[in-house]
Amino acid sequence: MMTVDSVVSDDRTLIDVDGLEVHFPIKRGIVVDRTVGYVYAVDGVSVRVHRGETYGLVGESGCGKSTLGKALLRLEQPTAGSIVFDGTDLAELKGEPLRRMRRRMQMVFQDSLSSLDPRQSVESLLVEGLRAHGLDHGREATATRLQELLSAVGLPASALRKYPHEFSGGQRQRIGIARALAVDPDLVVADEPVSALDVSVQAQVLNLLTDLQDEFGLTYLVIAHDLAVVRHIADRIGVMYLGGLVEETGADSLYAEPLHPYTRALLSAVPVPEPEVEDRREQILLSGDLPSPAEPPTGCRFHTRCPWRQPQRCDSERPELREVAPGHRVACHYAEDIRDGLIGP
Ligand SMILES: Nc1ncnc2c1ncn2[C@@H]1O[C@H](COP(=O)(O)OP(=O)(O)OP(=O)(O)O)[C@@H](O)[C@H]1O
Ligand code: SF4
Ligand SMILES: [Mg+2]
């Protein structure tokens, strides 16, 4: 049988996530806390990220992107499923071994103003990370390391004595990136790294991420709600809807041939700069609101809004994420029929 890279775990896989669920209990009650339900933030995600690649994770607000990112770093406890990082099952690690493994996985957050302690100078923010992992090897070595980090992210040496509020948003994001890089990680989960920035500054920070990836051999999981942000930096893209992955393929392939109805709708909402193409652009309007992750629809989670929805099967059977073309996975019962135009919206 033919094996396909994205489906079979091999030594190119840095992180291998299988059947991951993160459910948050909804508590109610005055005297005794009763669990009255769950928010199914992440509900059955299987994904692999290869060494040295940039995996873009996109989807609407609340679909579970951040929860998934945090669960990978064990900042959120999974309800079910497994996460294997470089061959080690993270669930088996506790205490010191888990702490050591954490050094290898770092996170960059959207809002660097709230994720960086305002009372700490840049120097102390960076040294803190080094110390936490026993990487503070004396004054001189640390001073050299800090210079290297600042120069890698394009900040002057004088930045060390300043405080987060003294920088612009873009510069602050550079500090957040320097802090993640300080401990020499393998994987960086960047959660909406440029969402808070002006468009002109967004490109600079994205370019910086790309340069650093080449320089330090990093693997990225970049989270964004905006497809345009991941388009230029991601090698592969996964599209999330209500706690599940609905489509995954190479970045170019996603734009050239989106197969899941949800991805098609997302892409149809992105304006095209050429007027002739813009006129012909297929506009897919989704009916209904985004359902609550506490009460996800039965069957295909997208069936309440899907223009291609078919009777019975769509609202009773949850489609698996399956390979429809090499390296192209889609969670839709009718992906081929929709692609071949056999059923219309
Ligand atoms: N600690 C928590 N306790 C309860 N519910 C939570 C918790 N964290 C997240 N949620 C809920 O889980 C769902 C997914 O949230 P998450 O932050 O992962 O989404 P997201 O895709 O990152 O959204 P956004 O684009 O707005 O950042 C949301 O409904 C959110 O309210
Ligand atoms: S399985 Fe049905 S409802 Fe779900 S995306 Fe496909 S056609 Fe639409
Ligand atoms: Mg988020």
Image (cartoon, grey):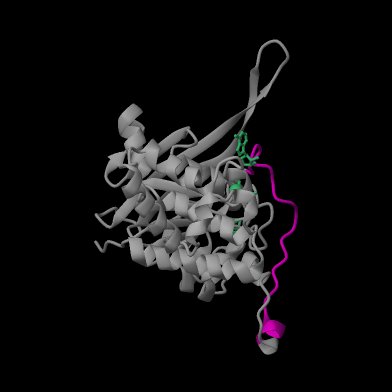
Q: Residue at x 51, y 64 (%)?
A: 335
Q: Spot the residue most to the bottom.
A: 276
Name the dominant secondary structure of the magenta segment.
loop
Which segment is the magenta one?
277-297
Q: Quadrant of ligand 2?
A: bottom right
| Residue 133: image location, x then y, percent | 35, 38
Please determine whether, in this image, residue 194 is positioned above or below residue 160.
below
Please determine whether, in this image, residue 111 is positioned above or below residue 323.
above
Q: Is residue 2 left or right of residue 142?
A: left
Q: Is residue 152 left or right of residue 86?
A: right
Q: Nearer the viewer, residue 265 or 67?
A: 67
Quarter of the view holding residue 39: top right
| Residue 260: image location, x then y, percent | 55, 63
| Residue 2: image location, x then y, percent | 26, 64
Q: Is residue 246 visible?
A: no
Q: Residue at x 43, y 47 (%)?
A: 106
| Residue 128: image location, x then y, percent | 44, 40
Q: Nearer the viewer, residue 271 or 135?
A: 135
Instruction: Tell me the quadrant of the picture where the N terminus can be found.
Output: bottom left
Q: Is residue 195 left or right of residue 249?
A: right
Please determine whether, in this image, residue 164 is positioned above or below residue 37.
below
Asked if the stretch drawn in magenta spans residue 281, the answer is yes
Q: Nearer the viewer, residue 194 or 225?
A: 194
Q: Residue at x 68, y 89 (%)?
A: 276
Q: Residue at x 42, y 62 (%)?
A: 152
Please determine whether, in this image, residue 121 is positioned above or below residue 249.
above
